[in-house]
Amino acid sequence: MTPERRCADALGRLLLRDTRTGLHTALTSDIDGLDATTYPVLSGLARLGDGVSTTELAAAVGLERSVTSRHVSALEAHGLLSRHPHAADRRAVAVALTDAGRAAVERARGRLDARLADLLSALDRAEADRFATVLDGLVEGLRDPSR
């Protein structure tokens, strides 16, 4: 099998819903108010920054606006984010992480860091760094529609 096909197959497995759900379940276990379905919304908000609309957030995390809105409501009920008027559009609602939301994201990301450190421990530091550089370049290349 060619390296290209091996990469394509690995990416396909990575993008499968059950792969993401399994990972998100492991990252969010015992974090109050957070689960595999709501984690992408909270994590996406942490990446985008406070003050984005639910429509912007939905587009960034790849969910329908109505689904994102339901997840935002659940996260708000658990005190992980808050809603307020959007600064640029009076018709829209903006969302922001609360301190508890930031702590939940940091806890989940810490678990991901530890899991990746364990998986990369078979490589020496230079190999792990090279792998991270190549993976980053691959992802950016796939995101670029002109390539």
Image (cartoon, helix red, strand yellow):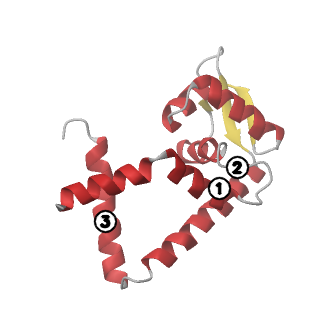
Circle 2 Cα neighbour tier, 10 Å, few/some/many (<14 / 14–19 / ≥20): some
Q: Which mark is residue 25?
A: 1
In the picture provided, is 32 more to the left or to the right than 116? right
Q: Position of residue 113 (x, y in %)?
A: 54, 69
Type of amino acid under label 3: Thr
Q: Position of residue 50 (x, y in %)?
A: 62, 40
Find the distance from the CA under tag 2 to the CA under tag 3: 30 Å
Circle 2 sits on which residue? 35
Type of amino acid under label 1: Thr
Find the distance from the CA under tag 1 to the CA under tag 2: 6 Å
* Residue at horizontal 37 percent and vertical 83 percent from the top: 125
| Callout 3: SS | helix
Q: Which mark is residue 131?
A: none
Q: Residue furthest front?
A: 1
Name the image quarter holding the N terminus: bottom left
In the picture provided, is 2 more to the left or to the right than 60? left
Q: Which mark is residue 133?
A: 3
- Corner quadrant of residue 41: top right
* Residue at horizontal 34 percent and vertical 74 percent from the top: 129
Identify whether 54 is placed above or below 92: below
Type of amino acid under label 2: Asp
Identify whether 22 is placed above or below 72: below
CB under 8 Å between callouts 1 and 2?
Answer: yes
Earlier residue among tags 3 and 1 = 1
Identify whether 16 is placed above or below 7: above
Residue 18 versus residue 99: which sits nearer the camera?
18
Find the distance from the CA under tag 3 to the CA under tag 1: 27 Å
